[in-house]
Image (spheres, rainbow, N blue to C red):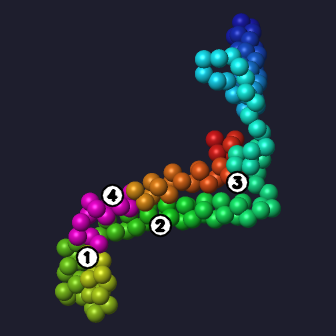
Amino acid sequence: MVTHTVLQHLGNTTKTIIHNVTTITHEAHDKHYTAGTTERVKVASSNPMCPDDFATFDNIWDFVWLGCAALCVISAALAAGLTMGLLSLDTLKLKIKAMTGTPEERRYAKQILPLLSDHHFLLCTLLIFNAAANEALPIFLDYILPSWAGK
């Protein structure tokens, strides 16, 4: 019985905390507190650069942001695939293929060997490309999705 009472009290406390956090979140969305003062400044809620709702795709910019987001996803996938594919190749085996393989294998091995001549440069380039694509994606998604959708 005591356990039931404690759990019921904790449940009510949790509901109160969630209600208070929701209230504070809504207040913080509508108002902005400046540092060191108690003065409240109203933030424009109809800011087209930070929508509170999903994009309506009634203007060209919604399609531009969607295209940029898709480009980021494709770029990140390409960089991840190239990282796994190119860095898993053995340069010694490629050199052997370049000398003893079929004419097609020789051509492909000779094209790939210059890329693999400096593994560290290749790895850094692909990782920076992947990181840039992954970090830019939320920026573009912010324009077409509400802020709560990305969290």
The residue positioned 71% from the left and 19% from the top of the image is 39
Looking at the rendered structure, which numbered label has been put on residue 113?
1
Q: Is residue 102 left or right of residue 59?
A: left
* Mark toward the start of the polypeptide (3 vs 2): 2
How far apart, in angstroms, are the residues tagged by discs 4 and 3? 31 Å
Q: Nearer the viewer, residue 44 or 144?
A: 44
Q: Is residue 148 left or right of residue 119?
A: right
Mark 2 against mark 4, which lies toward the viewer?
A: 4
From the image, tell me which residue sits under label 3. 144
- The picture places residue 93, in percent across and down from the top left corner, at 22, 76
Q: Is residue 91 left or right of residue 43?
A: left
- Identified by mark 3, the residue type is Ile
How far apart, in angstroms, are the residues tagged by discs 1 and 3? 42 Å
* Magenta part of the chain: 115-127
From the image, tell me which residue sits under label 4. 124
Mark 4 against mark 1, which lies toward the viewer?
A: 4
